Amino acid sequence: MTAVIGAGCRGCGACLLTCPEHAVRPGGPLLVLADLCNDCGECVEICPADTIEVIDD
Ligand code: SF4
Ligand code: SF4
């Protein structure tokens, strides 16, 4: 499982600041590093654009 950032991202940076594993890396678009993601779902909860999903990878 890993979080994936969708096309609706507004670039607010909340997921990047919230991730306990520092798995969200800056860039355009933001990227979640699957090897670091622990599937906690905190980024999903905090995203104001509701554009992050945790998927089976
Ligand atoms: S919290 Fe959502 S809108 Fe904000 S940067 Fe992350 S994916 Fe984009
Ligand atoms: S699910 Fe948790 S560990 Fe994975 S990117 Fe989101 S906040 Fe980070």
Image (cartoon, rainbow, N blue to C red):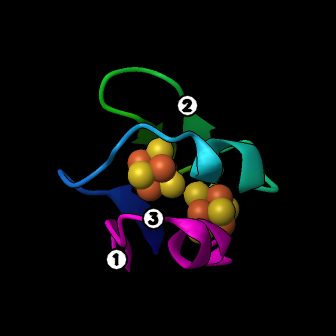
Q: Is residue 26 above or below residue 50?
A: above
Q: Comparing marks 1 and 2, which lies closer to the viewer?
A: 2
Q: How far across and down, in percent of the image, does residue 18 sit?
A: 74, 55
Q: How far across and down, in percent of the image, does residue 24 sit?
A: 57, 42
In the foreground, 8 or 42: 8
22 sits left or right of 4 in the view: right
Residues in magenta, as a range: 38-57
Q: Does the beta carbon at disc 1 come under 8 Å from ligand 2?
A: no
Q: Is residue 52 above or below residue 15?
A: below
34 sits left or right of 55 in the view: right
Give the amino acid at mark 2. Answer: Arg
Circle 3: element type: strand
Q: How far across and down, in percent of the image, does residue 10 sit?
A: 34, 44
Q: Is residue 55 visible?
A: yes
Q: Is residue 20 above or below residue 47?
A: above
First reached walking from the N terminus: tag 3 or tag 1:
3
Q: Which residue, given by chain and number where applicable, does mark 1 sit on?
A: 55
Circle 1: element type: strand
Q: Does the beta carbon at disc 3 come under 8 Å from ligand 2?
A: yes
Q: Which residue, given by chain and number where applicable, does mark 2 sit on?
A: 25
Query: Does the magenta segment cover residue 43?
Result: yes
Q: Which mark is residue 3?
A: 3
First reached walking from the N terminus: tag 2 or tag 3:
3
Q: CA distance from mark 2 to mark 3?
A: 12 Å
Q: How far across and down, in percent of the image, does residue 36 sit?
A: 65, 50
Q: Residue at x 58, y 79 (%)?
A: 45
26 sits left or right of 55 in the view: right
Neighbours of disc 2 within 10 Å: few (<14), some (14-19), many (20+): some
Give the amino acid at mark 1. Answer: Ile
